[in-house]
Image (spheres, rainbow, N blue to C red):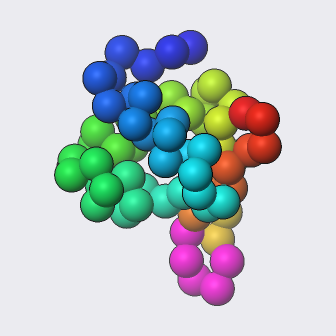
């Protein structure tokens, strides 16, 4: 399931360059709001690029899947 969002490619690039990816990281680096970041994240989860939400030391993140 490829996303129709024009920023999806940039979001994938971020996922490929980071070990962990958060909603805040997408928002900050792509200069977008929460709803759009959420849709991008959902698409990357559906495509197997990142795992579902995990929490470590009170900080939420998603682990980037190797060769996702």
Quarter that holds the C terminus? top right
* Magenta segment includes 35: no
Query: Can residue 41 be seen in this snapshot?
Result: no
Instruction: From this view, report whether residue 58 is shown above or below residue 63.
Output: below
Report which quarter residue 35 is drawn in.
top left
Residue drawn at 56 percent across, 46 percent down: 15
Query: Which x, y percent locates residue 39?
Result: 39, 34
Q: Main secondary structure of the magenta part?
A: strand
**How many numbered discs sit on the rendered protein?**
0
Q: Is residue 63 left or right of residue 28?
A: right
Residue drawn at 32 percent across, 31 percent down: 7
Residue drawn at 58 percent across, 51 percent down: 17
Instruction: Specify start and end residues of the magenta stretch as a single range.
Output: 56-60
Q: Is residue 2 left or right of residue 65?
A: left
Query: Can residue 24 be seen in this snapshot?
Result: yes
Residue drawn at 43 percent across, 29 percent down: 9
Quarter that holds the N terminus? top right
């Amino acid at each position: 399931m490829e996303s129709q969002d024009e920023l999806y490619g940039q979001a994938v690039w971020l996922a490929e360059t980071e070990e962990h990816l958060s909603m805040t990281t997408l928002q900050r680096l792509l200069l977008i709001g929460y709803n759009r970041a959420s849709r991008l994240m959902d698409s990357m989860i559906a495509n197997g690029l990142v795992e579902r939400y995990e929490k470590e030391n009170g900080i939420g993140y998603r682990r980037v899947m190797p060769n996702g």
